[in-house]
Image (cartoon, rainbow, N blue to C red):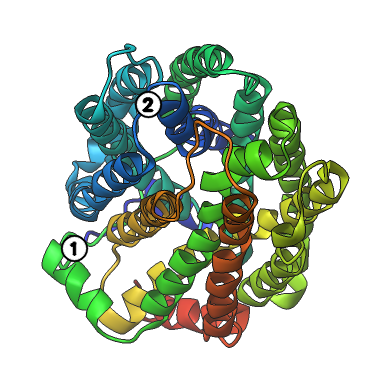
Amino acid sequence: MEKPNKQASVASQIPSLSVLLAYGSLAFPLAGAFIALQVIVPTYYAQSLGLSLSAIGGILLAARLWDLFTDPVVGYLSDRTPAHWGRRKAWVVGSAPLIAASVWLLFNPPLSAGNSFLLLSTLAIYVAGTMSIVPMNAWGAELSESYHQRSRISGVRVIFGLAGTLAALLLLDNSDNESLASSLFAITILTVVGLAVSVPLAAAVVPDQAKVDNQGNSLREALSLLSRPSPFRRLLLAFLLNGLGNAIPATLFLLYVTHVLEEPAVAGLMLFGYFVCSALSVPIWLAISKRWGKHRSWCIAVIGSCLFFCIAPFLGSGDVLLYGVVVIGTGLMIGADLALPSAINGDLIEWDALENNRRRPGLFFALWGTASKLAYALAVGLMFPALEFAGFDATISNTADDVRLLAVLYAAPSLIFKIAAIAMMWRFPIDETEHKRIRAALDARGI
């Protein structure tokens, strides 16, 4: 294991406000691009370009499954990048032009674009995003080894990400296909400009000299880590299940407001309100986690989301106000989803160092990124074909039974996945007391 130099003591300090803001700003352009990819792109390619729901679902799932390979590779290479370059910084800087180019390609397709275009352009944006997001998340976990400071760092990143999401949603117009195309072009410009500002800022301000173990960080080690019971595997599976619970309604959102509520014009307002509530709730959930612990606070928030999701299958045409209750309620809960699990994953870096004599933030956040992406891939890969198999068509009016099926699929699977995640995390073994014990044991070893 590399011995840290004096400057590497940054990991034990409280990051300054300037460092937090510069680091958090990296999430702004990425969030704007990926909310468009998750919510707008599937519907746009189906409604405007005429691709089938099954084809879109299969293509996006296949592209995401490629991340099962690329995420661990990027984590592996990131940990082995020379420290004098900045292990994480070099990847974040190098990926920025690739993200900009792939966003331009995917969000502004020619009218003749077909399945092959969607597959190649989606692969491009996923690979470019992996090259930035995996090192960026590891970078944040390395800025401090404190249980609560990690929550603070994660919270700042989440708030910037939500700001990017809100900025993108302000540009969304779902009134017709031409408006959707204009929205995607505007989000492209937002992403490119955001990258041009945030990446140089973070490269100049945020330190990147933390400790990394250059052994045991291979793909084989990743498979070994996942093959045996551990707090990490338990957290990762719960995160994936809860991520599926969030991804399914996100994927079906535009279809839900268009065909169930029959109010497509409210889509932008609803999404905007949802993410405003999410942003407002992040500091509240960080404060709650200081009293109740990260994992228990997360579970409480997921329970709250389930209670609000129970309303959605029973709504119909014109039920905008009731749907607003669902949106506001789940938005207030989602702040915990966004900030706390990632901070818990950061704490497991010390668990790994104590239990396995390894320090592998790149690997941990590579697998974390894979789980996050896989959730959205499975959502569109399962729900879109299920709708088409049942006879639902996004381009025409549907029967009442088909519309009711859409309403049920919007919420029911999410409830199942979220309840499973709660069951796994309620008695999670790594809380603040246990983390302090781990940290003390590492200090005693001089690690």
* Distance in Å between CA atoms under marks 2 and 1: 44 Å
Label 2–label 1 contact, CB within 8 A: no
Q: Position of residue 124 (x, y in %)?
A: 25, 30
Q: Position of residue 242 (x, y in %)?
A: 53, 66
Q: Which residue is mark 2?
A: 50
User: Relative to residue 38, is residue 357 depicted above or below?
Assistant: below
Q: Amino acid at mark 1?
A: Asn
Residue in the image at 23% along x and 25% along y: 117
Q: How many marks?
A: 2
Q: Quadrant of the C terminus?
A: bottom left
Between label 2 and label 1, give the one nearer the viewer: 2
Viewer-side residue, 165 vs 48: 48
User: Relative to residue 273, is residue 417 depicted above or below?
Assistant: below
Q: State which quadrant residue 428 falls in.
A: bottom right
Residue in the image at 52% along x and 37% along y: 39
Q: Earlier in the sequence, mark 2 or mark 1?
A: 2
Q: Element under label 1?
A: loop
Residue in the image at 18% along x and 47% along y: 77
- Tell me if 426 is positioned left or right of 3 in this view: right
Q: Which residue is mark 1?
A: 217
- Residue 132, can we see it? yes
As drawn, the label of residue 190 is none
Residue in the image at 24% along x and 42% along y: 83
- Tell me if 388 is positioned left or right of 81 in this view: right
